[in-house]
Image (cartoon, rainbow, N blue to C red):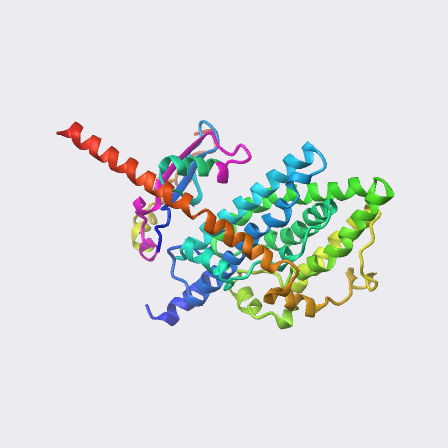
Amino acid sequence: MQTHDLEKNFQQKIDAEVKIEPKDWMPDAYRKNLIRQISQHAHSEVVGMLPEGNWITRAPSLRRKLILMAKVQDEAGHGLYLYSAAETLGAGRDDLVMDLLNGKAKYSSIFNYPTLTWADIGAIGWLVDGAAIMNQVMLTRTSYGPYARAMVRICKEESFHQRQGYEIMLTLAKGSPEQKAMAQDALDRWWWPSLMMFGPHDSESTHSEQSMKWKIKRKSNDELRQAFVDATVPQAELIGLKVPDPDLKWNEKRGHYDFGEINWNEFWNVVKGRGPCNKQRLDARRNAWENGAWVREAAMAYAEKKAARRMKQAGEEAA
Amino acid sequence: MKKEWPLWEVFIRSKSGLHHKHVGSLHAADAEMAIEHARDVYTRRNEGVSIWVVESKYITASDPADADPLFEPAKDKVYRHPTFYNLPDEVKHM
């Protein structure tokens, strides 16, 4: 078959909602686009452990500590589901990791903000995971089978993350004036970065149009952002917190909240590596990779030694 | 370049009486480590009672490009399905 027939065939499958599986023919650009998106998603899960891990030793109770550890373990698991989905496209695990460590691959900019107080852990679960869920629920229907299946698992687990975060905020909001102020401060600092998680406006987004055509994405950045605002504002009101946006107003005619403009300078600065914690995050990942090298090598050497011993034994028994 | 841990495919039996089902893959130095990693990665919420792992390189898969000829023989054999047969209404359950 000619490439252009293959491409036509491929688009017909996409249009007919037939999932693409690893060994199916696909355009190079589809493969590359997916490897980029899935690996960035995986890196985000892994880097996302850092701001939260920061609070494991200081969680205010044993219950909160257990929950936070479980959540951080989930993030590691999510990273692994996604890396293995990317590998079905022919990408090597070590290559993906190297792209992160040398700054070639991006991860979600939200994790370049610091977690200053315990309330930030609540805000992250509620807002950051809440925003991620909007995107991930859409991705459970993405056109590439392994990515969609990874997303189904992730979404099932992610729901606890958001609920535990909101519960932390609720508890603080009902607490002493100081605790309530701490919750409000966390919301003030995390609100805008959470809205930035959906990426640039549709008109500015480089990958969006093609991704929609290939049904990698099914909703645009702006649609998802609006859905997040609509869902989250009433949750803030319910626990007596104020969303830090003077332009936020319910628009009866649209049936949606209107909201203010994002500070795009800040967004691009953080994307380009000039956020408050970019260096710290990458240093932590590089340290983990370098300091873990001897473990990876020793485990492999031990496995090879055991295999050789088994071979020898089998040989002796046969003789 | 250091050697990467090989890739393993993971299959989980969610409860006795059901098949093992493919759930994903992971890297591990050997089979024993693959089982332990599979437990941590794929069964954090009691998803399984049994795990199989097999190194990915040992799986042989059919070629999707050959799917049509490969599965064609079953396509025109509707008589293999019970609904192919017209029976009198009086026969309620068969």
Asked if residue A213 shows in the view, the reply is yes
Residue A208 lies in magenta, yes or no?
no
Numbered-mark total: 0
Residue B58 lies in magenta, yes or no?
yes
Residue occupying image coordinates x 78% and y 60%: A257
> B84 or A243, which is in the foreground?
A243
Residue A25 locus on image (x, y percent): 38, 61
Q: Quadrant of residue A268?
A: bottom right
Report whether A116 appears left or right of B94: right
> A26 or A272, which is in the foreground?
A272
Quadrant in which the C terminus of chain A appears = top left
Report whether B71 appears left or right of B46: left
Residue B18 locus on image (x, y percent): 44, 31
Residue occupying image coordinates x 17% and y 27%: A317
Report whether A22 appears left or right of A118: left
Residue occupying image coordinates x 67% and y 50%: A130
Q: Quadrant of residue B53?
A: top left
Above or below residue A276? Residue B8 is: above
Quadrant in which the N terminus of chain A appears = bottom left
Q: Residue furthest left?
A: A319
Asked if residue A140 shows in the view, the reply is no
Residue occupying image coordinates x 76% and y 44%: A169
Above or below residue A107? Residue B41 is: above
Residue A85 locus on image (x, y percent): 46, 52
Q: Which residues are magenta?
A: B40-67
Residue B70 locus on image (x, y percent): 30, 51
